[in-house]
Amino acid sequence: MNFSNFLLMRHEILLLAITLLLLVGEIFISKSKKSSLVHLAIFLFGIHTAVGFFQMDESSLFGGSFQTNNLIHFFKNVLNIGVFILLLQSADWIQEKIVNQDRGTEFFILLFTSLLGMYFMISSGDFLMFYIGLELSTLPVAALAAYETTKRKSSEAGIKLILSAALASGVSLFGISLLYATSGSIFFNDIIEVITSTNLTILGFILFFAGLSFKISLVPFHFWTADVYEGAPISVASYLSVISKGAAVFILMILMFTVFKPLMHIWENVVYVIALATMFIGNLFALRQQNMKRFLAFSSIAQAGFILLGLITGTQLGTATIVYFVMIYIFSNLAAFGVVQAISLKTGKENMDDYNGLYRTNPGLSLIMMLALFSLAGIPPVAGFFGKFFLFTAAASKGFYLLVFLAVVNVTISLYYYLLVVRAMFIRKSEDPIPFFKNKLYMRLGLLITVIGILVLGLYSPLYDYIYELSSIYN
Amino acid sequence: MDILTLFVIIPVLTIVALVFTKGLKQARLVSMVGSIIQLGMAINLVFAYFKERAINKEIMVFTKDYVWFEQFNIHYTIGVDGISVALLLLTAIIVLAGVFISWKISDLPKEFFISLLVLASGVYGFFISLDLFTMFVFYEIAVIPMYLLIGIWGSGPKEYSAMKLTLMLMGASAVLLVGILGIYFNSNADGGALTFNILEIAQVNIPFEAQKLFFPLTFVGFAVLGALFPFHTWSPDGHASAPTAVSMLHAGVLMKLGGYGIFRIAMFLLPAGAIYWSWFFIILAAIGVVYGAFGAIRQTDLKYINAYASVSHLGLVLFALMTLNKIAWNGAILQSLSHGLLTALFFALIGMIYGRTHTRDISKLGGMMKILPFIGAIYVITGLAYLGLPGFSGFVAEMNIFVGAFENPDMFQRILTVLVVSSIVITAVYILRLVGKIMMGPLVTNDCENLPKATWYEKTGILLLLIPIIGMGVAPLWLSDMIQESLQPFIQGVL
């Protein structure tokens, strides 16, 4: 083995170095200067994100346990950008609320560790690496969910997340062991050769799928979502709904399109039913939510249902549309969470009614929120429309016209509740509106990047063509 | 920059300029300038079209094609024929008139004009598109500003109406999306590549089974916007709650997208499906015509009366399209144009009356002719044009439709035609009653004697609409020629 091969793990090594650096800094920097570590962490992560864009080879390491290719590399970059925006958006919250409790650096350490787990998860070449990655990405988030120790709901969220996550990964592990029992290997490439649709294999697949569905919060594995989002700090809810979900979708897609491809005639039906259930339940429950975090929780459940429309195809087109959609979804959802975060930080208000008359006092934030919601709903010319249209095209390419029809019915349902927020901000008037306030630099930067993403990602077509080209390995 | 893309660019530039304006005066000035440029471009386009037709044998002229999403074969393809040129001109007229009518909008003026122009750019884009995807994008861009326009600046139960309208139209576009995808994935039936290009798909023989399945989806998707019975319920509520300029634009232009889309996409691309389903949709359209007319009789709110009248008159467009007769088609397009102008004028007048008397209830209005002679006189003229008096645009259009519809020897269709013709009489009932009661009747209240006279901007808006109405009625031939030439591919393709 050549040391230059380690460059394939550039993302992982660099992020680990940053995490360790922060850990050292946490020990050696005096208490009064701790808040400078926030700037340092964001700065270092920005560099990490930028470095990620350099070209990388496609190969595998550790006898096939760790693999990387251009699509995986691209997706890690997308995750990086997402986390970077998230850091910008939560910087103010950390500086104002967390640093004086002397817990500022841990936030970054836990977050980066979780991201590291995701890198390993999506780069995994066998089920062992996959499982380690999955655990590494979940456990720190449970600690993060319980981060606001003064709030009871936050602790509740942490407990709920850790218990459900433990159960889910247990189920998943059982599925993996059944797959090992039938195929005699944990390496993806070996399993592809021997997998057949015997009952035991299918059972293994179903259990494995259930475990990952939990992370993506597909119905019926979604029960933890709303409570955890509501209790957890907004940054963490945002992280769960965007980064964590995106990574899980990505690895699920890779596995379904490679390892489980021979079982496609079976998982097609599973995905079909779960897609419908997820869209309908997510949307119908979102209709009556008042708390913005719960609202976005159900909305993000429904969005996951749409992603399954790309998953059901099992083709290059499906891969490309999923990656494209997830990327757009990251930007849109981060914009929505960013506005909720900004308002919550300044006023502590998190309910939809509190947003009444927001446009007249804070036009900028309202416009960003509207763009984000339109993007989530899929209204042109913002990016979400293109993401959804292509997902529907992917599903229709396989002849699933009924599924597409029911999905567009769901788009209309979702439009209703997205418009409720628009109505509150633009149409309703309030006796006691949220007063005008100016955001700090980090927050403004974080929101600006998301807005650029929402406006540009859809209209700029070469990006999709690039993703499609990268996706050629999964067809 | 080509002559057609400018129709999207100019409204967008106007919007950008509007962002930097302060206050009502600047905002309306900028919008007026932008809309005048659009109207100038539209008039210029008519002349350019005739010039181009003299040397170019193609039906579609000024075509341009840019690749957008290569993987899906999505292009930004544009081009116009006589029908789209006429509709572009209609849009430009109504947008400008709408800006004049909204001269005194007080609440959030900048945002109002921005939303109005977003809507306009969507409509322009829709009429110039020759690519299903691009067309669909513009369709949705045109619909979504309605929510804010009605919700923020509307009156009455505006939140309810805005939500109802948006959800029904977006639901329809969802159905339409499935239809479009169905057409797309059958566009390689003759062995070519998948394409969204309308002209290319028209050459393809899409399998009959697929046409049967996707025609109703595409048809209904567009027909909801054209207020097809029983999907018309958004329209009266939406019109009644919307501010004046929005009602004008919506009834005058946006609802025309429905008929145009049916003609250009559903019928042109799926001709066998159209023939197979025509008996069913013609019944719905005929019900809409008669039902709308009766609905208008029963209403007491001026805007509701006009909204139901629109359901009736646009039902006539759908009816004419479904008769599958070329004279009726010609009439359908003329009717779209004529109704667009007339209904916009009607809504403008209602807005002026409401702005002065603060009521739209006909029992509380009377003798307006005495106190508001200009508005009253125009109202009477519009009413007469609306019920199809010769010399105005309505007559030319309806005449064509009924002659064409009756030409078909099919007994079933003739009976329906007779039924539909009866709507003229019902229209006369509600229009004459309205004119008699609120214009000619005795004064109901005394305190309205000092109402302000029509202002210059109101008169300009009105004349902008009235001149083409009379022009169409007196000299319909140039328009008719333009449309008839463009009907050729439809006649070859569908009939």
Image: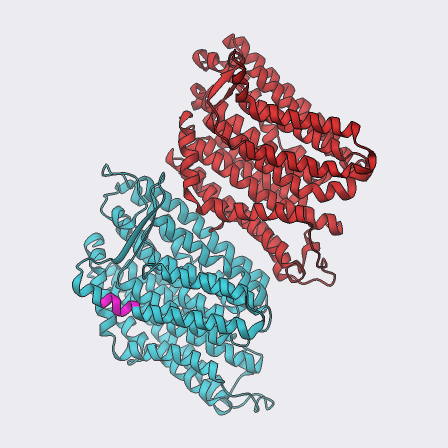
Give residue B418's quadrant in the image. Answer: bottom left
Residue A311 drawn above or below residue B267:
above
Residue A180 drawn above or below residue A326:
above
Give residue B182's quadrant in the image. Answer: top left
Q: Position of residue B400 (x, y in %)?
A: 25, 69
Left or right relative to A60: residue A417 = right
Instruction: Give me the residue at 78% from left, 39% from top.
Output: A98
Residue A164 drawn above or below residue B474:
above
Q: Position of residue A292 (x, y in %)?
A: 67, 47
Q: Which of the pair B2/A373 is nearer the observer?
A: B2
Chain coloured cyan in the rendered structure? B
Instruction: Give me the residue at 62% from left, 47% from top.
Output: A445
Give residue B306's quadrant in the image. Answer: bottom left
Residue B396 visible in this rendered orientation of the protein: yes
Left or right relative to B156: residue B344 = left
Q: Position of residue B371 (x, y in %)?
A: 51, 90
Residue A203 visible in this rendered orientation of the protein: no
The magenta segment is B45-50
Which part of the image, by quadrant, shows the C terminus of chain A? top left
Instruction: Give me the residue at 53% from left, 19% from top.
Output: A205
Magenta stretch prevailing secondary structure: helix
Instruction: Give me the residue at 34% from left, 68% from top.
Output: B41
Chain coloured red in the rendered structure? A
* Numbered disc total: 0
Check the image and tell me how it is coloured: by chain
Q: Which of the pair A7/A398 is nearer the observer?
A: A7
Q: Quick check: is A312 in the magenta stretch?
A: no
